[in-house]
Image: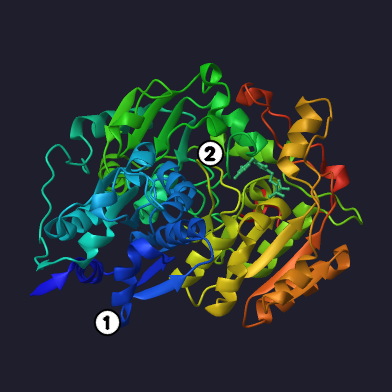
Amino acid sequence: MKLTGAQIVMECLQREGVEVVFGYPGGANLPMYDTLKDYPNIRHVLVRHEQAAAHAADAYARVTGKAGVAWATSGPGATNLVTGIANAWMDSVPLVCITGSVVTWLIGRDGFQEADITGITIPITKHNTLVLNVEDIAPAIREAFYIATTGRPGPVLVDIPRDIQQQVCEFIYPETVELRGYQPVTKGNARQVKRAAQLIAEAQRPLILAGHGVNIARAHEELREFAEKTQIPVITTLLGLGGFPGTHELFMGMPGMHGMYWNNIAIGEADLIIGIGMRFDDRVTGKLTEFAPNAKIIHVDIDPAEIGKNVPTAVPIVGDVKEVLGQLNREVSPARHDEWIGWFRRMQKEHPSILIPEVDKLLPQYVIKSIYDASGADAYYVTGVGQHQMWAAQYFWVDKPNGFITSGGLGTMGFEVPAAMGVQFAAPKETVWSICGDGGFQMTSQELATIVEYELPVKFAIINNGYLGMVRQWQEMFYKNNLSAVRMYQPDFVKLAEAYGMTALRVTDKAQVRGAIDAALNHPGPVLIDFQVEEYENTYPMVPPATALKDTVDSPYTYEDIRPRERERAGSR
Ligand SMILES: Cc1ncc(C[n+]2csc(CCOP(=O)(O)OP(=O)(O)O)c2C)c(N)n1
């Protein structure tokens, strides 16, 4: 069958099982747009900015486990994807970006809308390629999906000049992919697995530190079996949230810069740390030289480059975490660590860390906790970057695999709105909350138009403190309260949402919080709530930059400040 290059792209997408493409047209990818009407199974979502296409595809991929797909035209279209590509790169998300390029005879001549996108994205893609022959399109796209989704997932970019999209050739879909030098290891080395099991059997105070790899590999059941069999407490990184049920009695929450105080002290007390699908990022470790001084480390990761990169490892296991956890589960013996778990319970009482004081003011923590209380452990929660992100990570004890979608590695403000769109496309019937900072929201708020157009019932909560909150906190704590360029003029968010055709509410008083949340949940379409919260709240606990986990500054709130909680952590979880 003879097809044009653009038709070949579509045939390949169909065979890869792609259902949604997030994109934006322009001169260099018009041949692809011209084919859309002939491929009704592939839904194209017209975003308002290419950055949103990449973030939406990224979040869609996290929820579905399939590669997300984003399209853009050459030059500015392609460069607008860059932040989204870097975001997917840092968080190991499978993303396939297909860009149109200027016609082959103009490449390298600085013609209209030319940017060397393969050159620009070399450091932030797992692989990228400029296709210069129409016969190479099918192999390039087949390989793009294979590379994006196997091993450690990541973004792949395929750049196709406009004239190549228009040329015709015989369509042959390569059934297999053979790439020299690319053979991701999935099974853990049996000897290392045995050694790990031995260390686990000997440990008195072991701790599981689970990361995004558990969510990516969909290894939730295996992790749960492993933790339950060995009775080892589980803490997760920011991106690991949802990898282990938040309501499980062995779940202790997040460690690190804004993690639970008890976890940061526990890392110092532990004699064994089992790092699973995580990368010992500085937000988790604090000062590296003082990280886990008493612990041996077992590190399981699909990417050999991660092992030994930041911390010395006693037992390295390279492999897919689902596979390796399966192997470990067959190797380990049942155990109990009652004393160690009791230590956690005592610490949780003495250092409640995330209790909310009973005050009349509208505290952001109260709003975020109320959203969780009303929506449950089963909703999807998307966040931006900043204080609200950390409070969300502290108060949303999600049960759902991949139920917490956030920009971890790159820390991309503006992720919250388009990512929520991607999640709602992936899970049309589920409740999706987008927890937004008033700063970050304004970076991509134009996507409200897309959300209204496609009738996506996302609920937006703007945690509006009138500041770039996290920056204000750092200026207050580390720059002598010199508040420089952090106060931000805000539009009327309610009117803005209404202008886009959305229902919107404003909340200024604590007493209105639950009513507004319930109203949003009961409304069938998208809703925005502008929560005008206390301006000067800070996020605690906090490990000041460049200090050790043992130097965690605990929440200033104590039991005396707070109303007894409905479900006290120690008892009910
Ligand atoms: C694109 C981008 N620019 C700058 C930053 C640096 N930064 C990190 S947090 C933050 C403040 C975020 O403010 P807001 O979105 O209002 O959330 P809040 O901290 O108030 O909850 C900034 C500017 C960033 N993370 N991303």
Q: From what the image shows, is residue 510 above or below residue 228?
A: below
Number of residues whose C-alpha sits closer than 10 Å to that of mark 1, classed few (under 14), some (14–19) or many (20 or more):
few
Mark 1: amino acid: Asp
Residue at horizontal 28%, vertical 79%?
A: 39
Q: Quadrant of residue 482?
A: top right
Q: What secondary structure is marked by label 2?
A: helix
Q: Is residue 315 above or below residue 330?
A: above
Q: Quadrant of residue 254?
A: top right
Nearer to us in this view, 417 or 190 = 417
Q: Residue at 31%, 80% (x, y): give it.
A: 41
- The residue labelled by disc 2 is 338
Q: Position of residue 203 (x, y in %)?
A: 42, 28
Image height of 354 relative to 95, above or below: above
Q: Quadrant of the N terminus?
A: bottom left
- Residue pictured at 54% horizontal, 45% vertical: 238
Q: Which mark is residue 38?
A: 1
Residue 509 in picture, x, y percent from top left: 88, 64
Separation of disc 1 and disc 2 at Cα?
62 Å
Ligand 1 resides in the quarter of the picture at top right
Foreground mark, 1 or 2, reads 1
Question: How far from the left and from the top, in percent, is residue 85?
Answer: 42, 48
Q: Amino acid at mark 2?
A: Asp
Residue 380 image point, x, y percent: 54, 64
